[in-house]
Image (tube, rainbow, N blue to C red):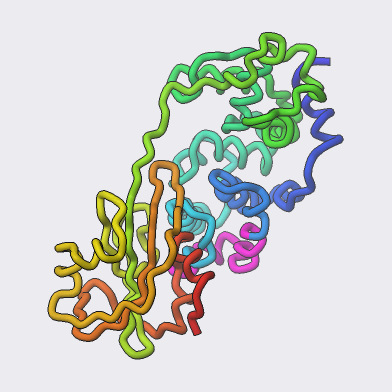
Amino acid sequence: MNFSNKLIGWYQDNKRDLPWRNTVNPYHIWLSEIILQQTRVLQGTPCYLAFLKAFPTIEDLANAPEFKVLKMWQGLGYYSRARNLHFTAKDIVNNFGGEFPKDYRKMLQFKGIGVYTAAAITSFAFDMPYAVVDGNVIRVLSRVFGVSIPSDTSVGKKQFQQLAQELLIEKESAIYNQAIMEFGAMKCKPKSPDCSNCPMQDFCVAYATNSVAELPVKSMKIKVKDRFLHYFLIEQEDNVFLGKRKSGIWIGLYEFPFLEFPIKMNQKQVMQSDEWSQRFLNSTCDVKSVSSEFIHILSHQKIYAQFWQINATGVKLEEYELIPRNSLLEFPVSRLTEKYFETIELG
């Protein structure tokens, strides 16, 4: 039995029952793939179901205000995914009558839909013969076939795509694609894969050469930047200052006024800084509390954040507006701010 048939056999016996596997609706499949790009299945499943409840059809999503879309996406992170999802929903509704084109190349023209997502939609929704290649697939192919070329280079990407396409069983493209991704997620894991009970053991090159831990290979290591942020929940009576971010990874989300420093600083150092003096010029501040440190890790950033609760008079913040404190949960915020909200009383 060859690799592809053995893979499908394993999948039929071991697959998880996930909601997006019980549909050929391209909108549902598209949504699931976008969510799962940067989110684990356990976290992504309830978000997927809640999102579909809020926007049952692609028309509902297209017609929704961005504010509501971002609020429903809250907690998933990488908010550009939600903005691209919203933009493309409008594009499909306005220019394609609300129907996904059954054309792989046309699919690639949509904002936020790349080679992998286009292959997933056309394969799972329309049973077209396009092989998916994501991190799980690369890991399986690299180990089983001993491919040591770096997967994050243009040559490597091309080679993995070609190998995946050659292994695809065209008349069973949907189940094959599901199978290889599931195998990578459940069996051939990044760390501590279950090699001793693997159905591919007899012909897995990495297992035979004791190189499982070294594959797949990447040529570039992401450089992570440390950031030190101090957010200020500035209260005036029952209102607080909140502003809509106009740039960066959290564009469109709401946040408190903040100061950023190049190094970690304690409360006294922050209050003695020039940045503090400029932020609270001609105002009177009473610091009620400073939170413990929150550490929030993103792909290229490690954020160390503290939240200050301050009573203030005379503060002028033109880029922020005063909103009732008890309405804070109505606004879409970053997961970092959401974690802070979970520790305080907002009523």
Q: Is 92 placed above or below 331 here? A: above
Along the horizontal axis of the image, is 36 left or right of 196? left
Q: Is residue 39 above or below residue 207?
A: below
For image coordinates 53% across by 56% down, the residue present is 76
Q: Nearer the viewer, residue 26 or 240?
A: 240
| Quarter where residue 258 is shown | bottom left
Can you name the residue that lies furthest to the top here?
A: 209
Residue 46 position, x and y percent, is 66, 59
Magenta region: which residues?
Answer: 47-68
Magenta portion: prevailing SS class: helix
Residue at the location (31% across, 60% down)? 266
Residue drawn where x is 46% and y is 84% of the image: 326
Residue sitting nearer the eye, 159 or 77: 77
Asked if the magenta segment contains residue 342, the reply would be: no
**Residue nearest the observer in this picture, 81 or 295:** 295
Identity of the residue drawn at 44% across and 77% down: 328
